[in-house]
Image (tube, rainbow, N blue to C red):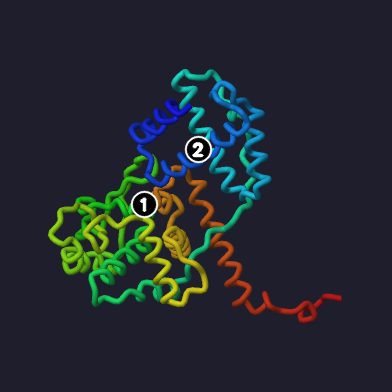
Amino acid sequence: MQEVFNRYIGYLQAERNVSPYTLRNYTADLMDFFGFLRTRGTRSLREIDKQAVRNYLSHLKEQGLAKTSIACKLSAIRSFYRYLVREGMISTSPVATTPSPKLDKRLPSFLTIEEVNRLLEAPGLSTPQGLRDRALLELLYSSGMRVSELSRLNLEQVNLDTREIRVWGKGSRERIVLMGKPAAEALGLYLVQARPKLLHKKSSGAVFLNRYGERLPERRVQKILEVYSRKAGMPKKVHPHMLRHTFATHMLNGGADLRVVQELLGHSSLSSTQIYTHVTKSQAKKVYLSAHPMAQAKDDEHPGQA
């Protein structure tokens, strides 16, 4: 199994070109699956059938794992078996007909415009790190980029004159994202005044650098947001994807076409973008209930009612 697993990981890297984050998660999920099977005496891939998969899923439920986590593990297993079928190692997949857990529909969290402004103003601009942090916060909100796309961003992908950035998202799909004037100004200031100081005469094509002159990793970006969200007095935990949610929600609230937002986010399916229409409808209902005088009227205030 180990040899086949190693070949599959090589396939994900070379042909699927998955992100390091996806590769890490798939590896961990599959190792957990194989580890469970080994404790049940399974030593060969050919011994794994539908019942073995059901036993594993039941085990996860008994452990109290969230439905989303179980769905992710099942997705990793499905991908692995699709590869085995494709390579002719097995004829059918034991998970082909296994249904995913029915997930609770949760609306994505997002920040208000006032909260965004507080967050963007949190970094001080007297240090190279502060200029860098202001630029990356502005860019995440202005463009709707994924944190992985921001971390992998190189200088040649950025055009400050046209305020456009060429990125490669999931599945190596290329797209152009846009940034507003404040984001472009913050990024330009960082590139001129701060990045050379962080670079320390090293050579790097990465846009965002840490204090050692190396590419800023995704986890560090997440930590930066945690620090500034606390500094800005946010009542909620802010993570990079929340700024992506906020970008989409504010775009739709501002009247943007759903397909335009889909293109800017890099969603392959419109259904992935449509969740934000539910967010805007929810927000509209809150505004209506708080602002419309008849929405707050008591029953006895309506004429003609017994």
| Residue under numbered circle 1 | 148
The quadrant the C terminus occupies is bottom right
- Going by the numbered disc 2, the residue's amino acid type is Met
List x then y, in percent, for residue 209: 25, 59
> Of the residues shown, which amino acid type is indicated by label 1?
Ser
**Residue most extreme to the right:** 306
* Secondary element at tag 1: helix
Dividing the picture into quadrants, the one containing residue 57 is top right
Labels in figure, total: 2
Which residue is tagged 2? 31
Q: Earlier in the sequence, mark 1 or mark 2?
A: 2
Q: In front of the other: label 1 or label 2?
A: 2
**Left or right: 37 as drawn, with respect to 180:** right
- In percent of width and height, residue 70 lies at 59, 44
What's the residue at 32%, 47% (across, down)? 175
Horizontally, residue 206 falls left or right of residue 272, namely left
SS for tag 2? helix
Q: Vertical placement of 248 versus 269: above or below?
A: below
Callout 2 crowding tier (Cα within 10 Å): few <14, some 14–19, many ≥20: some
